[in-house]
Image: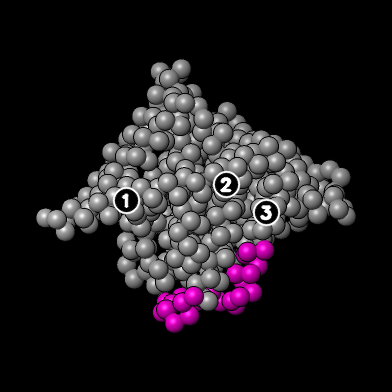
Amino acid sequence: MLVGGTIVIGILRTPGDVAAQLPSPALFLGAWIIGGLYALLAAISLAEPGAMVARSGGQYVFVSRGLGRYPGFVVGWSDWLSLCATVALGGMVFTEYVEPLLPALGGRGGATGVAVVLLFGLLLWRGIRIGDLSQQILSAAKALAFGSLIAVCLSVPASAETAAGSGTTGGAAPSGLALATAIVLALQAVIYTYDGWNGPLYFGEETRNPGHGIPRSMVLGVLLVILIYVLVNVAFLRVLGISRMAGDPFVAASVGQQLFGDRGDLVIRLLVLISILSGMNAIVLMAPRVLLAMSRDRLLPAALQTVNRGGTPTVAHWTTIGVVAGFILSGTVNSVLALCAFFFVFNYTLSFVSVFALRRKEPETPRPFRVPGFPFTTGLALLGSLAFLGGSVVSDWSHSWKSMVLLALSYPVYRVLERHQHGTTEDTENSTESF
């Protein structure tokens, strides 16, 4: 789940942006290593409450337990919307990349994207076992594809720039304040590319021995992703050099063209399609479990608690599929994702705070896994989130202020839902007593 949900198409596109900010191989690779270490700190921090609570539903379950129902509600609904928008974007990008291979689909982008989402809906509706099997197959295919690309890149002669060692920079290297700004902007892009390391948290109660399985999968999964990302970027540097990578909107396509000529487009398209399918499979499994957890806590209608024999929360599942299809057909997915970018970082900030809150509120609760180096490790992850939250506000104010307005509006929505659910519960109890 972690590998499939993390390695999508960001690693194929983002290196060009990072190289433009940091046109030095050492700084460039350093940014990917630092971003990976941040993801590792975040993973080991949230593995503690994930293993302790061991409920399906992602970060919502322990934020609501540590900080209260309203913070949990904010994390839950924004996380679910973000996941839906991400699946919708995957369906749209999949269509863009498959159309040249299947010209008959030309001009039917929306319908094709919805069809792909519906196929995932039907497949994963059967249950968690088929979802697990499909995720293992797709993630293994993805790892094999990336491993093959890395091997080919490292086996060919290095680019003239890399071989000569003269291209240590692809342009004027920043210094002073400009360097600090460039590092922050580069790390923002890198950390978004690492996003997905929290995948195992959505399946707490469906994991065998969650006290051991969740921390193990998160730590080993992040280490594997770091290894793949660093090797991919070393391979790209070897083939193109930092100067050709800088500013390239799709570095992987340039690498494919360099390695395979005219066939490079087909090779990279297949890699993108495999990556997207694996990511969509993972997120379609994750998203309904947020609604399920919120419904169990009486923040959403009770119907969302319906689970079939295969372990799929059916009403939540088809609600998710319906919203994803709506995003694709309405063309609003990019707007939703832009607004949710703020919430991604905000949710992580609340999640790290909840680790401290649970240590204070429930010091005696058994913790199968405890954060190594606490409170310093979790404190560093929290400081990183606060820094990137500030960076998101500064660098994308046009969307950040709208996200903050939505955050403020979430409180009256929460109060209405609370009042409605409380009233429904009282009516049910009264009719039971009368009976």
Up the image or down, 371 lies above or below 279; here it is below
In the rendered view, does 388 fall on the left or right side of 123?
right
Q: Position of residue 132 (x, y in %)?
A: 33, 53
Q: The disc labelled 2 sits on which kind of residue?
A: Ala
SS class of the residue under badge 2?
helix
Task: State the separation of the CA atoms marked 1 and 2.
Answer: 24 Å
Left or right of residue 369: residue 372: right
**What segment carries the magenta color?**
361-383
Q: Amino acid at mark 1?
A: Gly
Mark 3 is on which residue type?
Phe
Q: Nearer the viewer, mark 3 or mark 2?
A: 2
| Callouts 1 and 3 close, C-beta under 8 Å | no
The residue located at (68%, 37%) in the rendering is 398
User: Which circle's residue, 3 or 2, is located before the other in the chain?
Assistant: 3
Q: Is residue 366 magenta?
A: yes
**Where does label 3 land, which residue?**
388
Q: Judge whether 28 appears above or below 87 on screen.
A: below
Write down the quadrant of residue 263 in the picture: top right
Q: Please name the residue shown 50% across and 53% down the image.
A: 75
Q: Earlier in the sequence, mark 1 or mark 3?
A: 3
Pointers 1 and 2 in contact (C-beta within 8 Å)? no
How far apart are labels 1 and 3 at the CA level? Answer: 40 Å
Residue 31 on the magenta span: no
Does residue 187 appear to the left or right of 143 in the view shown? right
**Element type at marker 1?**
helix
- Residue at image position (64%, 51%) is 190
Secondary structure of residue under mark 3: helix
- Mark 1 and mark 2 lie on one chain; the one further toward the N terminus is 2
Tell me the chief SS of the magenta region: loop
Badge 3 crowding class, 10 Å Cα cut-off, few under 14, some 14 to 19, many 20 or more, is many
Give the labeled residue for mark 2.
Answer: 408
Residue with the mark numbered 1 = 423
